[in-house]
Image (tube, rainbow, N blue to C red):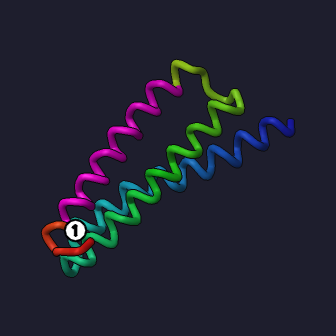
Amino acid sequence: MASEKKEFVISKQLLRSGTAIGALIREAEHAQSKKDFLNKMNIALKEANETEYWIDLLKDSGFISSEEYNNISQQIKELLKLLVSIVKTTKQNLNIS
């Protein structure tokens, strides 16, 4: 029973951070300025990083199989690379370090 509760808590956190990524990207589509766009994409990047943490924790706790982890992990790593690229490019375009 305690194990199921832990899995539920971790899954809830994963759902929260994972859905926040999409919401922030949608918000960025209609940003008020390029700096606002960058801010939203930076937060989406942080949420993606947190999502990766929760996925790792699910695997390390044995709540998902290695096969499930490998599939999900690869997808979140690709998303992280995309978001890092967007943030870097936007910073370069805004001449921000």
Q: Residue 92, located in which quarter of the rendered image?
A: bottom left
User: Residue at coordinates 40% horizontally, 31% vertically from top-left?
Assistant: 74
In the picture, measured across the screen, residue 32 lies left or right of residue 5, that is left
User: Residue at coordinates 86% horizontally, 36% vertically from top-left?
Assistant: 1
Q: Residue furthest front?
A: 97
**The magenta stretch spans residue 71:** yes
Q: Residue furthest top?
A: 67
Q: What percent of the width, then of the height, locates residue 9?
A: 70, 48
In the picture, measured across the screen, residue 50 lies left or right of residue 37, that is right
Q: 86 above or below 92?
A: above
Q: Residue 36, located in which quarter of the rendered image?
A: bottom left
Which amino acid type is shown beneath numbered disc 1? Lys
Q: Residue furthest bottom?
A: 32
**The magenta stretch spans residue 79:** yes
Examine the residues drawn in magenta and state their main secondary structure.
helix
Q: Which contiguous range is marked in magenta?
A: 69-90
In the picture, measured across the screen, residue 93 lies left or right of residue 79, that is left
Q: 96 above or below 29?
A: below
Query: Considering the numbered disc 1 on the image, is that residue within a helix, a strand or a loop?
Result: helix
Q: Quadrant of the C terminus?
A: bottom left
Identify which residue, 34 or 15, lies in the foreground.
34
Q: Mark 1: few, some, or many residues within 10 Å (few <14, many ≥20)?
A: some
Q: What percent of the width, then of the height, locates residue 58?
A: 64, 36
Identify which residue, 20 or 74, lies in the foreground.
74
Judging by the rendered image, the residue that carries numbered circle 1 is 91
Q: Residue furthest left?
A: 93
In the picture, measured across the screen, residue 2 lies left or right of residue 41, that is right
User: Residue at coordinates 46% horizontally, 33% vertically from top-left?
Assistant: 73
Identify which residue, 83 or 92, lies in the foreground.
92
Q: What percent of the width, then of the height, locates residue 49?
A: 47, 51
User: Residue at coordinates 51% horizontally, 55% vertically from top-left?
Assistant: 17
